[in-house]
Amino acid sequence: MEKINFSHYLKLHTQQKYFIWNNPDAQNSDEIDLDDDDFDQKLWDFDSFHENQIKFPELHENIFKSFNKTFYFYIKDRFADKKICLVSKILIDEKIEQTVDFYKNQKCDIIFNPAFEYKNATAKPSVFFVFNKKLSILKLSTSTKVKDYLRANWDFWISNYMLREISGDLNPIDEVSCFLINTVEHPKKNKIEFHETFWISRYKSAKTISKADSESGNIFLAKKIAKQNGLSLDEFWDNTFLENNKIIKNLFRNQIEKISKVKDKKPIHMIPVNIAIDEIIDAKNVTKFSKPSEIDNSAFEKSPNFAFLVEQFYPQLTGISGTLLNSRRILSLVNDETRLISFEKNSYWYNFFKKSNSIIINEIENLETFINKMNGKKIVWYDFEALSLPFPAMDYAQPFQQIVTQVSIVVTDNGKILPQDFDETNVVFDPKTYSWDNFCKIIDKIYLESADFYVVFNKSYELTRLKEMVNIIFMHYQSNNPYHEAIEKIQKYQKKVDEIIAKTIDLKDPFSKYWVVISDLKGFYSIKKIENFINEYNYNLDHLITPYKKLAVKNGLEAMIKAVDRYFNYIGDMEWIETRKNLQIYCQNDVIAMIMVWDFLKFIYENRDKMTHIETKTPKKVTLF
């Protein structure tokens, strides 16, 4: 009989019961966004590996094992006076048997990598501290989210029930904690720091700090506490609040609620494990799925099958940007047939998105100002590619921080691309030998004293990377020079970056602010979708790109994986020569793509109301409701 594990318990809270034991033939996954704040931690999703939900490449598997080994030695050093017993067996039944033996012989203070079983359901917490009755879970992330409560609840109760049967102790576990990858103010290259927390965030995504905490004078600590625990500074300094809101307290309640003087949102309920096991077994008899419902957008997370379900039952609602039509809005429509009919009939933009190759200039004055501002100017167009690792890739870089490893630059003057040397303007730094002073070279490459503007697509990404570069350069200066000299030395790069930022134009603005609305994009505005639209309808523009499917490196994720592989020397020196060239071609193509999009904007503006599919309209807010 197949054993039940945490992945089944997670699905019970976040998906229809059919999906607990079945996967649909096809799923619509959301488009990968490298500019997403959580992208890096999604890339290194070790929880998925732990639960065998997806097949990780060998590289990821080795890093996962390396983290476990590092964590073992961290526990060993921290509890040097305790006897640690390591569960080394591979098969789950053997792991459980070895765990039981260690527990029964009463010679182990700590059991590392244990496994427990209750009613054919298994749990694999990271550490069981026998000596003080504490169960701990290692999460290879810098933050907690509300769904981490489900993992804690599952591991706690399965372990608790089994240990009760063995020992006769009604409360064999008194405490539950979570170990995270720690963020420190002065991280060292490749050094992994851990942090133990007894509080888990009650938010779906990592909590951001409040305005009050951002002005507290200790923004680093405030951000850290918010991400790790989901707490404000006031809550963190309140010992009574902390005691009342420990993980273990919520597990005994089988619900997640904030116990405080301030009224909070209603509690989030967790299905008791005893009941959940029976429901998971019964789910094997469920032979079909139904239309999207509340469980598909639960308080813990949105079901990965949500888009699939919408496509199956309401295909007319698929493909629309979540900014305009999110899962909550979709559920409000599918749960009210009258409202859905009215929506389909009366929503102006919904019906516009059903058209093909139709373009509306929604705010002509803003578009005109945008175009006139750039016409006849000298412009530096540039794009970054980066690598991200779950530990500091270099001194002073945080875990998961994106480190820019390549930059491509094109300079135009009055719309004409100036002659340039391919290798000089498409720079790829070797991740295997990467150094902080590469940041100096990147800034120097981008900066052009005679430039009127710098253009990127989604400026928040590039400008964040530039600020991080300056900060790391300064930290290195400060480590080798007196403070006043470090301040003096950094001015060269600080001034260049300040000027780049001040002169930056975001090519995304006309699309994200809906000055221009394109039917086929359905409210989306990623550069890749705009490129696909241009190519699909064969717009004859001055600058066109090589189709990405024809490139050896086809997208930013592939570029990052190449950089990560090289960092770990999975790509040898001879192979790197060819890989480097392919990365140069890809990144340059991205920059030309921006110029192509600029040409497209001018084409739209110049052909407004001349071509039947390009219309100027009185400004109308782009909303579906």
Image: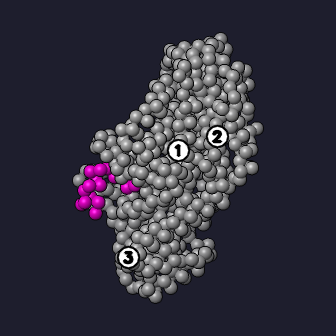
Q: Which residue is painted at 60% across and 66% down in the image?
A: 284
User: Can you tell which quarter of the image residue 165 is in?
Assistant: bottom left
Q: Check disc 1 and report the residue beneath it.
A: 436
Mark sitting earlier along the chain (3/2):
3
Q: Position of residue 179 (x, y in %)?
A: 43, 63
* Disc 3 versus disc 1: nearer the observer: 1
Tell me which label, 3 or 1, sits earlier in the chain: 3
Q: Amino acid at mark 1?
A: Trp
Mark 2 / mark 1, whichever is N-terminal: 2
The stretch of residues the image draws in magenta is: 228-243
Furthest-top residue in this view: 610
Element under disc 2: strand
Q: Quadrant of residue 214?
A: top left
Residue 17 in magenta stretch? no
How packed mark 2 is, by other alpha carbons closer than 10 Å (few <14, some 14-19, many 20 or more), is many
Q: Which residue is rendered at x = 49% and y = 24% of the image?
A: 503
- Mark 3 and mark 2: Cα distance apart in space: 51 Å
Query: Which residue corresponds to mark 3?
Result: 133
Q: Nearer the viewer, residue 155 or 389?
A: 389
